[in-house]
Amino acid sequence: MGRSTSGLARSAALMFGALAFVAGSTTAAPASAQAPLINTYGGPVGFGSNMLPINDDGSSDPIDLTAAFPGGLNFFGGPYTQVWVNNNGNITFSGPVFNYTPTPFPVADRPMIAPYWGDVDTRGGGTPNNNGVFYHLEPGRMVATWHNVGYYSSNDDRKMDFQLILTNSLDCRAGDFDVEFRYNRCEWTTGDASGGSGGLGGTPAQAGFDAGNSMDFVEIRGSRTMAILDVCTTSNVGIPGVWRFSVRGGEVSCPGTGEVCDTGMMGACGVGVTQCVGRDVVCSPVGTMSAERCNGTDDDCDGSTDEGGDLCSTAGDICVRGSCVPPCFEGGCGEGESCNADGICVESACVDVTCPEGQRCRGGSCVGACDGIVCPHNQQCVAGRCTDLCDVLTCPDGELCVDGACVAQCPCRECDAGQTCLADGSCIDSACDIVTCDPGFYCEAGECRDACAGAVCPEGQRCQAGDCVDGPAPMADAGVPPGTGDGGAPPPPPGIDGGGMEDTDGGVDRRPPARGDPGCNCRAAGRDRAPSLAWLLAPLAFVLWRRRGAR
């Protein structure tokens, strides 16, 4: 449709107030393609057989959602059973929207999901198949695609290529769904009638969600600035050009937790993990400062690494580059070691190797502070220390923390074969359903097992009752100090008996108990059970990221 400053669309835009914003330069290089659009939905170019007519500021007729989502979609209310695809880069649930200049969220009476709300104009050049708006519905999914679209007024020298995918969630609650924005080509921000020139300047496009209640909204960073072009090269899930969100109970949440992040603090205190707080992803520290250890990490978060004396458990050793090594002696160094320029015995392969902060040399290569550390059961190594990330993470309703990440509770997700769904939403081995283990032990296949079995703690720590704690490693005779006799000595605490051998990391090299030997006194106790359904727990892995060292 045409427009002028006195037209209906122009008046509607002015109702929300005049906007004036010019960010950065008035020119910008086109962003290269990042995320390919999914084109397996049929139709002339694979984006579906439904297409908006060539237009400016138009919308689709109301689209019945029940073919894809029988119960509708719960988006800050509802459930909504119909939707409108609007030419200007968004979909709405309460009626069509013709506004071409994006109004800052939140806006009343306009529930909207906007991958790129800007002044799209498909009248200029190209063909309908290469400058058009498509949509497609199938069971459990709706896809809307703005394929190589131009901007007002009938310009096609710069193009935008982006896609919105709504997918039914596998969770229990009806109406829950997942949202994905995909950006393949990002070249313009603004139409001529929104103060733009050559597709840039003026009031740039906006991306995100608006509840339509004048209160709740989610906005992608860079909206209504030139930085909105960065959606092609940035992401909230680590895939350039892909942005994912979850809508649970009608509200938008962030996509996941448990990724290593930087808190901005010094040393080990700078290492955190991501978690959802409302709709935002925040970086939560995995722990507080601790006593300095010889590991190449600033443990006490004071900006210095491995400083101070008495960092090594072996008398005479010196902490050098994150490892405890002996000084050179008259006869030279031990087998496989050489005396370096500082008079220190080091691995021969490491004599000429200098590692960055937070790393140390082993076998001629720089390794991280967690290399060689095996944490006790249900713990992960971060910045050279073992911690249970589930003590840090706060999961949203309907989820619980497993192995340092938030996952859906059963029975909304199936447990593995041979597992039982408990009333708290967790999955356990069916044989462990009525077994309660002592602290420091865990149940596997109906038997209580030592959480310290196989653990190799950081230098200067030992595994005790399922945790790495400060102190020397136990002696090879099951931890009984010499001279105490063999009849009256109290047994060591659970988790440190069994004949550990001290290793070079100060941890304990342990062999797991034989499978037929529970290794503890187990007690049978009843537990409440939810109906037993299977859910598939995805394997979770925690990968150590860059560690902050001295500044």
Image (tube, rainbow, N blue to C red):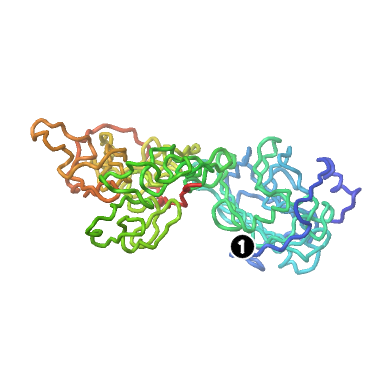
Q: Tell me if 19 is positioned left or right of 458 in this view.
A: right
Report the residue at 81% width, 58% height from top.
152
Q: Is residue 551 above or below residue 437?
A: below
Q: Tell me if 217 is positioned left or right of 297 in this view.
A: right
Residue 130: x percent and y percent?
Answer: 72, 67
Residue 25: x percent and y percent?
Answer: 76, 56
Q: Is residue 368 visible?
A: yes
Badge count: 1
Q: Is residue 382 visible?
A: no
Residue found farthest to the right:
6
Camera-nearest residue between 262 and 143:
262
Camera-nearest residue between 119 and 21:
21
Camera-nearest residue between 517 and 536:
517
Q: Quadrant of residue 286?
A: top left
Residue 43: x percent and y percent?
Answer: 65, 66
Q: Tell me if 237 is positioned left or right of 15 in this view.
A: left
Report the residue at 67% width, 52% height from top.
115
**10 Å neighbourhood of mark 1: few (<14), some, or many (≥20)?**
some
Question: Which element type, helix, strand or loop, lies under badge 1?
Answer: loop
Residue 459: x percent and y percent?
Answer: 32, 46
Q: Amino acid at mark 1?
A: Gln
**The N terminus lies in which quarter of the figure?**
bottom right
Instruction: Provide the residue designation for mark 1.
Output: 34
